[in-house]
């Protein structure tokens, strides 16, 4: 059964307690001491670069490896980084003789890594979590890639940061497929990621009954507003219609109105006027003999007219002509 290795993300982003459990489980299943020591070195780099504390991570497990595991080149090469896990006499009398043939070899190695060890074990200075570094490395094929680490202690000098990043190039556990990662360090940039502002919504404690009442009141208010708006719209439409009707009626009256002086008498009125002003019958004329003016007429017995002499004239006959001419003039005046 192949044991799943510890990933780069777990090493640089997992919490200390979870990471210790993951490392212990990996060693119990694989018994790969070299892999575990390189993981511990990478975690020490994270401890030195960031404000997170990983001091003496997996201390009991690493002590067991250096005291009981078979010596190897990996254990010897990174041994100065874990000297502080042991007492002075225990380290020099037990661990060093197990790993090195003579003490001078260890002292030469310890001296060459003294600045690295100092950077790894120096305490954190900054506590600002809103800082990061953006680095560029080359992988085993020579291709450049970018790697970013957050919560960086920016109060460290550039030389210290450079030294810590170069320690990652000595590790062989990081790979992308079959290509080794962190093969060569190129550069890094530090930057501030401080947020401009922060707002936290306060917790709201809402009682059930008032909430229901408020909701019901809100519904009633909305219904009342809706009715009021509908009534206002209806009233406005009616007023507009009434106004339009009144305007149309007024226009019609204005069009049909004719001043009294300009009116022309109708045909029926003319006929009535003619009949009213008809000439009165000539009582003395011959045509009106035997008739009586009024509503009723009675026939009279014909009487023989008195003999008239040829020399006498009818006085009424002379007066009828002037009356007729006056009637005609009066009718013409009415028509005009």
Image (cartoon, helix red, strand yellow):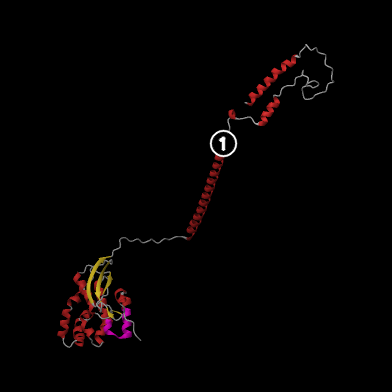
Task: Please state if 322 lies on the left or on the right of 70 as rendered.
Answer: right
Is 313 covered by the magenta stretch? no
Q: Residues within 10 Å of mark 1 (few under 14, many from 20)?
A: few
Q: Tell me the residue at 54%/42% (across/down).
A: 244
Q: Quadrant of the C terminus?
A: top right
Examine the residues drawn in magenta and state their main secondary structure: helix
Residue 94 vs residue 267, the one in the foreground: 267
Is 29 covered by the magenta stretch? yes
Residue 299 vs residue 255, the one in the foreground: 299
Task: Please state if 303 lies on the left or on the right of 264 as rendered.
Answer: right
Q: Quadrant of the N terminus?
A: bottom left
Image coords of residue 112 (percent x, y): 16, 79
Image coords of residue 191 (percent x, y): 25, 66
Instruction: State which quadrant residue 303 falls in.
Output: top right
| Residue pointed to by mark 1 | 255
Query: Which element type, helix, strand or loop, lies under badge 1?
Result: helix
Instruction: State which quadrant residue 254 falls in.
Output: top right
Residue 329 vs residue 207, the one in the foreground: 329
Task: Please state if 318 lies on the left or on the right of 168 as rendered.
Answer: right
| Residue 77 appears anywhere in the view | yes
Task: Tell how many labels.
Answer: 1
Task: Please state if 213 lies on the left or on the right of 18 as rendered.
Answer: right
Image coords of residue 286 (percent x, y): 78, 19
Q: Residue furthest front?
A: 310
Residue 212 vs residue 45, the one in the foreground: 45
Q: Tell me the residue at 20%/72% (across/down).
A: 160
| Residue 52 appears anywhere in the view | no
Residue 130, placed above or below residue 170: above
Residue 302, placed above or below residue 225: above
Image coords of residue 73 (percent x, y): 22, 85
User: Residues in magenta?
Assistant: 20-36
């Amino acid at each position: 059964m192949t044991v799943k290795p510890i990933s780069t993300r777990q090493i640089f982003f997992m919490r200390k307690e979870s990471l210790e459990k993951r490392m212990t489980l990996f060693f119990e299943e694989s018994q790969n001491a070299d892999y575990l020591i390189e993981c511990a070195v990478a975690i020490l780099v994270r401890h030195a670069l960031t404000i997170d504390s990983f001091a003496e991570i997996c201390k009991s497990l690493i002590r067991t490896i250096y005291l009981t595991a078979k010596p190897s080149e990996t254990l010897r090469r990174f041994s100065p980084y874990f000297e502080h896990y042991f007492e002075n006499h225990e380290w020099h009398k037990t661990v060093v003789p197990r790993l090195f043939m003579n003490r001078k070899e260890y002292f030469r190695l310890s001296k060459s890594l003294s600045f690295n060890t100092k950077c790894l074990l120096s305490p954190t200075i900054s506590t600002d979590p809103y800082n990061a570094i953006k680095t560029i490395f080359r992988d085993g094929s020579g291709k450049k890639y970018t790697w970013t680490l957050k919560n960086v202690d920016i109060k460290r000098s550039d030389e210290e940061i450079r030294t810590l990043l170069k320690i990652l190039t000595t590790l062989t556990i990081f790979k992308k497929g079959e290509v080794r990662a962190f093969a060569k360090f190129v550069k890094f940039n530090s930057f501030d990621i401080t947020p401009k502002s922060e707002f936290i919504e306060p917790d709201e404690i809402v009682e059930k009954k008032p909430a229901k009442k408020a909701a019901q009141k809100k519904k009633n208010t909305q219904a009342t507003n809706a009715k009021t708006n509908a009534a206002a719209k209806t009233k406005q439409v009616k007023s507009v219609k009434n106004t339009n009707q009144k305007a149309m009626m007024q226009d019609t009256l204005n069009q049909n109105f004719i001043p009294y002086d300009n009116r022309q008498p109708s045909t029926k009125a003319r006929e009535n006027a003619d009949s009213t002003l008809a000439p009165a019958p000539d009582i003395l004329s011959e045509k009106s003999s035997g008739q009586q003016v009024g509503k009723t007429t009675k026939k009279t017995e014909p009487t023989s007219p008195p003999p008239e002499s040829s020399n006498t004239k009818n006085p009424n006959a002379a007066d009828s002509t002037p009356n007729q001419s006056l009637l005609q003039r009066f009718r013409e005046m009415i028509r005009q």
